[in-house]
Image (tube, helix red, strand yellow):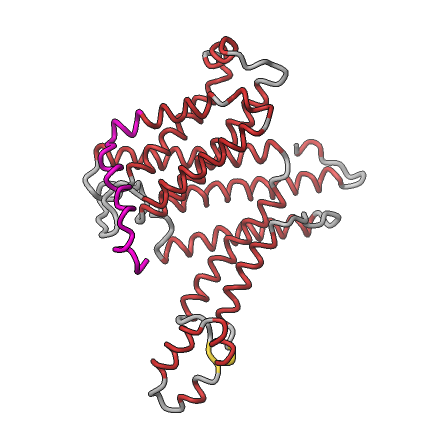
Amino acid sequence: MLNCRTDCEGLDIVSVACSRFDTIIELTLAGLLLFMPLAFGAVQPWSREVVIVLSGVIVLSFLLKMLWQKQRSMFRHWAYVPIAALLLIVVLQLVPLPCSLVSVISPNTAALKSELLGDLPNAGIRLDKMTLSFYPHATRHDLRLMLAVAGVFVVVLNVFRRPEQIKRLLMVIAAIGGIVAAIALAQTLFGNGKLYWFISTKYSEGYSGPFVNHSHYGQFMNLSMGAALGLIIVKLYEDFAGKKATPATIATYLGSVSARSLWILIAIIILGITTVFSSLTRGGMVSMLIAVGFTTLMLMRRYSFKEHGWIMVLIALGAFTCVLYVGFDAVYDRLATLRNLDQYSSR
């Protein structure tokens, strides 16, 4: 690529520079996606700072690319709207508002703050205006993390535009999910109740891999399996283009060299499903089952994928077999607690 540099119009120089920025962004993003789950789910202060720094590198690289490639504008998409709305809601919680307005928006907040601060000197002045947030310092801290994540989202939406880029990103997410799931399964089968076999924590019994919170693990794995399933759909669409998916054709395809990556992706999803159940996160299990059902219905509605329903059956059978081996009784007992939701009224 460097040999293509010319001094005629500078187009090759600009393309080389922009491709370098894209490479930096892709590598940094891959490192960020790998770091967060392995660093206990990025719930500790030091890991959050690393997330903010790496996110800053990604955003700065994108801004430098935009400055270098002056003729290019940002991609317009409706996906900015929910992100902006969420950030606006958080910012609104930090703005001092009249007490009368807070009483309308959140009556309990206004009442509790008035009760707790009513005995302080100059309480009338202090309570004249108040924030919706009970702890503005923590809200500002979380807002900073949200801005970092939103910045990464905007960069990905603008940089990952080509099909090969999108497939690489999905492959990175799926591969990281497979690595984390392998750690979780190893801890389930051979663990001692500690993270990485030597870190004790009161929030985990070692069933959720490197994550401190098994609920975080469940949702992370659901997203990772979604990336793997997306790649499977793309691969089936490409490999069966112009072909009829008959049982004989499918059997021949599954034994071919081109299906090796498909088997890897299927293994990642089966491993992910197994470890979501073994982590005993009810939210993760329920949301995964809902997602599987919805995705299956959507795929069956598309004529081009009606012939590939076998892929969901294959994944379901593999996952069910693995869950039976790991421990179905514990999963059943955990889900059975959903009958008695009264004991979780505070949640």
Q: Quadrant of the C terminus?
A: bottom left
State the image coordinates of residue 56 (x, y, percent, origin top left): 52, 54
Magenta highlight on residue 340: yes
Residue most extreme to the left: 192
Q: Looking at the image, is 61 positioned above or below residue 123?
A: above
State the image coordinates of residue 100 (x, y, percent, origin top left): 50, 80
Q: Looking at the image, is 309 positioned above or below residue 114?
A: above
Residue 25 quadrant = top right
Taking the image as shown, residue 22 lies to the left or right of residue 232, namely: right
How many numbered markers are drawn? 0
Q: Looking at the image, is 282 positioned above or below residue 112?
A: above
Q: Which residues are magenta?
A: 321-347
State the image coordinates of residue 27 (x, y, percent, origin top left): 51, 40
Residue found 66% across the figure and 32% down from its top = 1
Taking the image as shown, residue 191 lies to the left or right of residue 44, namely: left
Q: Main secondary structure of the magenta part?
A: helix
Residue most extreme to the right: 8
Residue found 41% across the figure and 22% down from its top = 314
Residue 193 quadrant = top left
Magenta highlight on residue 5: no
Viewer-proximal residue among 319 and 186: 319
Viewer-proximal residue among 99 and 206: 99
State the image coordinates of residue 309 (x, y, percent, origin top left): 49, 23
Residue most extreme to the bottom: 122
Taking the image as shown, residue 198 lies to the left or right of residue 165, namely: left
